[in-house]
Image (spheres, helix red, strand yellow):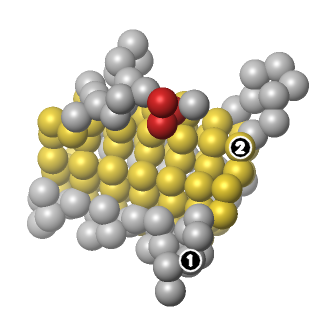
């Protein structure tokens, strides 16, 4: 699946204590440590990764192939391939995913909506506890 492909490089950073208002479109990889009020959209046609760190807050829609969340999201999340929810992830909105990995402590206040192709079943895994 997604792990068989090479991860794209993270070329852009929204740093801690940075606030952005407006939509952000990116190619390949983006890491968010600050605050964004607007949509984060990965351009299609390239493999993409979006990392939302534990210090980040995003109010808006998220769209990327591989999404890793450890911060707060208020809005819908669309992971075209894999969604990883780290222990401090907080999502208020519907979550659309092809494959989902959720660590203990992550919370979702919204609907889980698998993106199915035909009769394919979604892939769900519970991350191993390290504690």
Task: Using a 10 Å C-alpha cutoff, classify the residue at mark 1 as few (fewer than 14 neighbours), some (14 to 19) or many (20 or more).
Answer: few
Measured as percent of width and height from the top left, residue 47 is found at: 38, 24
Circle 1: element type: loop
Q: Quadrant of residue 39?
A: top left
Measured as percent of width and height from the top left, residue 51 is found at: 33, 50
The residue at the point 51 percent across, 60 percent down is: 85
In this orientation, which residue lies closer to the viewer: 72 or 103? 103
Alpha carbons under labels 1 and 2: distance apart: 19 Å
Quarter that holds the N terminus: top right
Instruction: Answer whether labels 1 and 2 touch (C-beta < 8 Å).
Output: no
Looking at the image, residue 98 lies above or below residue 58: above
Measured as percent of width and height from the top left, residue 62 is found at: 44, 42
Task: Using a 10 Å C-alpha cutoff, classify the residue at mark 2 as few (fewer than 14 neighbours), some (14 to 19) or many (20 or more).
Answer: few
Dot 1 or dot 2, earlier in sequence: 2
Point out the residue furthest to the front here: 4
Q: Quickly name the residue at label 1.
A: 129
Point out the residue furthest to the right here: 119
User: Seen in the image, is 129 located left or right of residue 57?
Assistant: right
Point out the residue furthest to the bottom here: 131
The residue at the point 70 percent across, 32 percent down is: 115
Q: Quickly name the residue at label 2.
A: 123
Query: So how many labels did they put on this image?
Result: 2
């Amino acid at each position: 699946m997604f792990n068989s492909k090479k991860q794209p490089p993270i070329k852009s950073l929204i740093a801690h204590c940075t606030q952005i208002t407006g939509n952000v479109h990116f190619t390949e990889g983006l890491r968010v440590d600050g605050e964004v009020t607007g949509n984060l959209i990965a351009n299609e046609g390239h493999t993409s990764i979006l990392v939302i760190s534990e210090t980040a807050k995003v109010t808006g829609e998220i769209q990327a192939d591989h999404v890793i969340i450890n911060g707060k999201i208020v809005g819908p999340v669309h992971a075209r391939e894999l969604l990883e929810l780290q222990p401090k992830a907080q999502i208020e909105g519907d979550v659309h995913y092809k494959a989902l990995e959720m660590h203990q402590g992550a919370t979702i206040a919204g609907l889980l909506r698998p993106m199915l192709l035909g009769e394919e079943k979604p892939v769900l895994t519970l991350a191993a506890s390290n504690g």
